Image: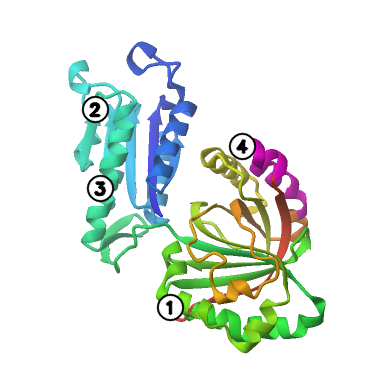
Amino acid sequence: MTRILLVQGANMAYLGQREPEIYGTTTAAELDQMLQRRALERQVDLQIFYTHIEGEAIGRIYQAAQDGTDGLLVNPAGFMHAGYALRDCLRAMRFPYVEVHMSNLDKRGLRSVTAETARGTITGFGLQSYFIGLDALLELVEDDRRTKGKIAVTGSAAQVAPQPETRASSPGILAIWNDRDESIADVYERWYLSEHVPERLAVPGFLAARRYEAVKGAPRFFTRYDVESVDVLSSVDYLAKLASPSPRTRQVMASFRNMMRTACVVAYRSPGSAFGGCVVAAFVEQPARVDQVALIERARQCERDARVLGVQVWQAAPDPVQAATNEARLRPGGDRRIEAALVVDVMREEDGRSLDVPICAALRQSVTSETGAGGVPIHSNVYHLLGRWHARV
């Protein structure tokens, strides 16, 4: 997923309150919501950072250069008058930077000292300056990808380094929850470790696998496969595996119970997140409807807790092979699907147990349809990590 940072400079946090005759009455929070909706439409991870301090803006931009951010959108606001240190920081960046201003600077007789470092400047369109700027920035990011360059920063120096072709689609997850018959426990574990995980990670586009077991809640087992994109889950190589399950796979799949299997898009992922020994997985089943913007905002609030290592929001993607393969037909009762999940990594089980209720509440408050709120199960379980595997490069 393309990652964009928007830096809002001095006084922008008071949008809607300060000089409404120039900047209008829309508040900063309302603008953020509007921009996040556009970002979701474009499958963009948009981080928004407000500061009245030039040094904080500089630090956040250097951080972006190091954490894989693809492009920068800035309204320098009050920094535009004498922000020479910010200008020097922007000059060092090699990802595309677009500067936006709500008012027409020329009409007001103003000049921005940071504008000379931008690929382009959008001025005078009010709130629309942000949307025009974001769209233009995404085009620049794609242009840079086509030239196969990426940002590489060591300390405060930036340089261009070659990279392989970047996929335009978002990262994907194959999320699986299940119980199993106790009578097959030993066979189940041997099959997972010696056959199933290695087989899946041999499929092109499968990147990693993680297996968890519940310490609170059900189903008992939770498995996630990270894939380059959800397109991998309808690839010829993957479909061939589903069409021809091995004898042991046939035996084990017949023991699965309470199966939920969903191809998901990673709608949001914490920047610089880490994986912990425990995870809280809150998820709602279909046909619920979820306000994804609200859920991402609540996910970001979860990040502020010192016990949280990282947060992800998953959104169900269309899965043309759902329940239509030979492997799926082996599982009694069929497969249910989730609509969305809020997955939070922590270090310790006690952290997971204490965060379980607020994380579930964050998801529940984001369910918008009456069907989802009243009649569709919302789960929140705490799992400890059993193992983590990576595909061979």
Residue 347: give x, y in percent of width and height.
68, 60
- Gap between marks 3 and 4 measured at Cα: 35 Å
The answer to whether the residue labelled 4 contacts the one labelled 2, judged by CB atoms less than 8 Å apart, is no
In primary-sequence order, the first of circles 1 and 3 is: 3
**Residue at 65% from the left image edge and 87% from the top image edge:** 248
**Image mark for residue 123:** 2
Name which residue type carries label 3.
Glu
- Gap between marks 3 and 2 measured at Cα: 18 Å
Instruction: Label 1: state its secondary structure.
Output: helix
In the image, residue 387 above or below residue 367: below
Q: Which residue is mark 4?
A: 369
Name which residue type carries label 4.
Ser
Name which residue type carries label 2.
Thr
Q: Is the residue marked by circle 4 packed among few (<14), some (14-19), or many (20+) residues within 10 Å? A: some
Q: Which residues are magenta?
A: 353-375
In primary-sequence order, the first of circles 3 and 4 is: 3
Q: Where is residue 98, by image quadrant?
A: top left
Q: Where is residue 114, by image quadrant?
A: top left
